[in-house]
Amino acid sequence: MSHHILEIEHLRHVYPDGTRALNDVSLRITHGESVAIIGANGAGKSTLLSHLNGYLLPSSGAIRIGHLAVGKGTLSEVRRTVGMVFHDPDDQLFMPTVYEDVAFGPSNLGITGSDLERCVTDALKRVDAAHLSRKAPYHLSAGEKRRVAIATVLSMSPDILVMDEPTNGLDPFARRQLIGLLKEFRHSKVITSHDLDMVLEVCERTVVLSGGEVRADGATVEIFRDEALLRECRLEKPLSMQGCPVCANGGK
Amino acid sequence: MASINQALLDLKRLDQLAAGGTVLHRLDPRAKVLATLVFIVSVVSFGRYELSALIPFLFFPAFLIALGQLPAGYLVAKAALVCPLAVAVGMFNPFFDRSVLMQLGPLDITGGWISFASIVLRTALTVGAALTLTALTGFPAICRALERLGMPRAFAMQLLFLYRYLFVLSEEVGRASRARELRSFGRNGDGLKSYASLLGHLLLRTWQRAERMHMAMLARGFSGVLPGREGSRFGAPEFAFLFFWSALCVTLRLNNAPQLLGALVTGQLP
């Protein structure tokens, strides 16, 4: 389906205070691809993500989702197609119970009754959170919050999943669980993260942003092998690609 | 900040109690809200020297606590937290109002003491009833009920968000204030000045969070109306509940039951 192709063309964004956050960014993400967007703090990752569902509109350039240009008139369609998982789940879980939160999106889309119930339970089951449905969001652990935040988006059956630092603040087990989950999804995925080991596992393609520009775009493994590029962009190899410091010293 | 965190844990407990499954929990929240409202209005509308007529009103919270299987000790302790406030309000009555209204053997009881006791008792009753209502219904359900009873939607939404983000904000306040304490080494730091800037930061952060939340809501198709749960029905049990308690409260308001009972007993046993 052409619907799942995400095209960004010569995107520029200048904030009202004059900060040039994005400068001529062009990308094309095709159906089913998992793409990581990495870069130093302030490289423009979050600004780029905010454009993908039309929260920010480009100063110049264009974004297309399938045949749909992101603009004021297409926002509701765009927002259904692009599911956005926020950096801080507390921003995303605002309803009194988990169930109502997951139902928020679908009921805004006009789904009601047993359809709504099925939609919500399915989404919660997919993230292994069906048992949490009656709980209040502030009673959840960080890992549970993150999974529920993903369910709130899944329940709208988006074609493209956009996630801002999904493994941030999770313990190793919850992180592992989330990585397993992300690998299962057949959606196109756009993920920003500083957790480069997760990127290595989940995304086959990586885009490196630096100073609001695309510095590199290619296979994740290739990009992580380019130490000079990484250093220049204030990044470093994922730990799993670095030699083990203990073994290197003869186990001392 | 331990005390704030403690108070929040308690709020969470109130929430958990609301998840119970007794007959009272299952009643439509509107019935409970209205009954509590009638109760509070009846209690508050008594004259300042009324004491004995208030006592039968204890039956309402007591009944709800018993039938709703709520922990009485916990609710009494919560209500007691507010009592110092009532004591502060009524504290000076005994000094200003020295007219003797009652004699208990050799003891003269002045109007001041009676009005003081009345204020404290009324506070305990109203706060107790409100707490019991929350423990039986849950705060979000009360908001929804108020909305269905005609409160403007914007207020209901604000109340819901207030309750949801109370937890997030107070955790932030707790952290910021602990950070300040840890670096002030038992002195007063910069005194009020540091608190002023701390508050300013919290306000700005709240602002930013509000923006992010709004973004999250828009991202999921928010168009100005929070989708509500399909509401429960206001059926016969609800009518019965509301009618019984309203009738009882109004009757007790219009007649002084302890006095009637006293007259009955003394009339029969001269």
Image: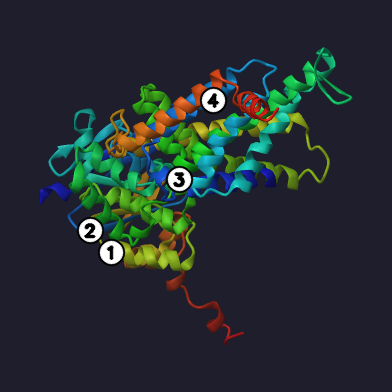
Query: Does dot 1 land on a helix, a strand or a loop?
Result: loop
A233 or B189, which is in the foreground?
B189
Residue at the spot x=30%, y=32% of the render? A57
* Circles 1 and 4 on the same chain: no
Q: Residue furthest right?
A: B106
B218 or B72, which is in the foreground?
B72
Nearest to the eye among marks 3 and 1: give it: 3
Residue receiving disc 3: A90
The disc labelled 3 sits on which kind of residue? Answer: Asp
Q: Residues within 10 Å of mark 1 (few under 14, many from 20)?
A: some
Residue receiving disc 1: A204
Q: Chain of mark 4?
A: B
Query: Does dot 4 land on a helix, a strand or a loop?
Result: helix
Q: Residue furthest left?
A: A1
Q: Chain of mark 2?
A: A
| Displayed quadrant of residue A218 | bottom left
Q: Which mark is residue A50?
A: none
Choose the circle earlier in sequence order: 2 or 3.
Answer: 2
Residue at the spot x=81%, y=37% of the render? B188
Residue receiving disc 4: B40
Residue at the spot x=50%, y=31% of the render? B207
Q: Chain of mark 3?
A: A
| Displayed quadrant of residue A188 | bottom left
* C-alpha separation, residue under disc 3 versus residue under disc 1: 29 Å
* C-alpha separation, residue under disc 3 versus residue under disc 4: 36 Å
Query: Does dot 2 land on a helix, a strand or a loop?
Result: loop
Choose the circle earlier in sequence order: 3 or 1.
Answer: 3
Q: Which mark is residue A33?
A: 2
